[in-house]
Image (spheres, coloured by chain):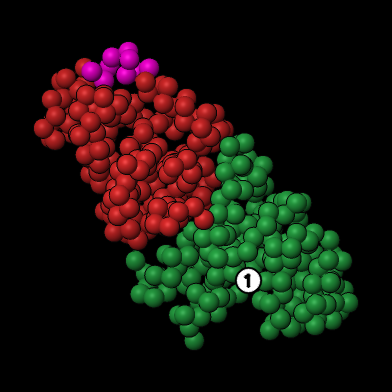
Chain colours: A red, B green
Amino acid sequence: MPNPIDFHFDFSSPYSFLASEQIEPLAARHGRTVVFQPILLGVVFKASGSAPLTEQYGPKAKYSVHDFERSARFAGVRYRQPSKFPIGAVAASRAVLWLQQHQPDRANPFVHAVFRAFFQDDRDISDAAVVAQIAQSLGIDSAALMEGAQAPAIKDALRKRVEDAVALGVFGAPTIVVDGEVFWGNDRLPQIERWLASGPF
Amino acid sequence: MPNPIDFHFDFSSPYSFLASEQIEPLAARHGRTVVFQPILLGVVFKASGSAPLTEQYGPKAKYSVHDFERSARFAGVRYRQPSKFPIGAVAASRAVLWLQQHQPDRANPFVHAVFRAFFQDDRDISDAAVVAQIAQSLGIDSAALMEGAQAPAIKDALRKRVEDAVALGVFGAPTIVVDGEVFWGNDRLPQIERWLASGPF
């Protein structure tokens, strides 16, 4: 059984969203599955001394939004720049961890639903009530989920996951790890595809 | 006659080198030519508050060198991380401008030769004597070139070109402009190819 692909992401990262829409079909073409690993870029950026693209140098921030939208069209993914951006997605990230532990089959569909709510339907996924509604719409018991996601063990697990990502050298998102090889960015999907198809190059 | 593609680059930028090796065949497939526009990233980074990748946060710097090399293999371009890096390429950049004014047919081959000397053969292209040798090897009168490149008009032209790039919103290299549409990075070649093939998307 080949290793699953680790997909480190932040729900507030546009390029993570674009890659999240493509990584599972790509992985499946090569007999792989994907584990979505939520991280918190706010913490990562504190370690790396970076900042969200939209808060960087003016021309770069402006280009970035244009590029999010153009890259979405290029990938055939519907995209709308959220009106509240960036946001913190702690509640949604903890919910992912709880699902991975308790209802693993529902974790990946939940990740996609949260991402789409934010980047397609302009919903404020920093609001735990919105996260609960998204879970409910997937048939998940949202009361159990939101209570479980508040447990100290889940809070610790998310904290540890972010620390582990920083220790691994993660400095942005998405960071996609295939058999130990690290690829940063939605742009690297073609390299990942070749790596999966014909091995290390 | 369609517009040429403007390729803003710094001789010290690995992704500029990788893109420089691919942009002319790509342009030719769509009936376009390329004008290489030297800029000085040192000046651009002063405006944008940025720094060369290899001088950024440790894990990002380390990843970047790995990614330069892997991206080169992916593109089928021979690459060797220069032992002296980054460098300032003022003399070589001025020489490009002089050739564009006085021997325009030789400008693009000279750009490729300088890039390859640096990123394939580990030559120190910050040294004007090395730049002169490269010109000589292409059959260019290097004495005339190096003297011409010191003229105040050429110095002013390079300064103005960098200022114009900053004013245009350039914040990194390569920045490739197709009919007014701005694409940043070697990663954007696939989007440029689609833009040229089937128009704006």
Q: Mark 1 belongs to which amino acid?
A: Phe
In the image, residue A160 lies at what x, y percent? 42, 22
Q: Nearer the viewer, residue A91 or A28?
A: A28
Residue positioned 48% across, 65% down in the render:
B189
Q: Is residue A115 above or below residue A151?
A: below
Front residue of B175/A158: it is A158
Kindly tell me whether residue A131 is visible in this rendering: no
A144 is within the stretch colored magenta: no
Q: Secondary structure at mark 1?
A: strand
Q: Is residue A137 visible?
A: yes
Locate residue A82, reporting x and y percent: 31, 43
Looking at the image, the residue that sits furthest to the top is: A152
Indicate the quadrant where residue A154 lies.
top left
Q: Residues within 10 Å of mark 1 (few under 14, many from 20)?
A: many
- Residue lying at 41% horizontally and 26% vertically, measured from the top left: A161
Magenta residues span: A148-156
Residue B200 drawn above or below residue B32: above
Q: Quadrant of residue A33?
A: top left
Percent of width and height locating residue B156 = 76, 66
In the image: residue A140, left or right of residue A185? left
Outermost residue on the front side: it is A1
- Main secondary-structure element of the magenta-colored stretch: helix
Which residue is disc 1 drawn over? Answer: B36
Q: Chain of mark 1?
A: B
In the drawing, does residue A191 fall left or right of residue B157? left
Number of residue marks: 1
User: Vertical placement of A67 versus B109: above or below?
Assistant: above
The quadrant of the image that shows the C terminus of chain B is bottom left
Which residue is pictured at 72% across the width and 54% down the height?
A: B82
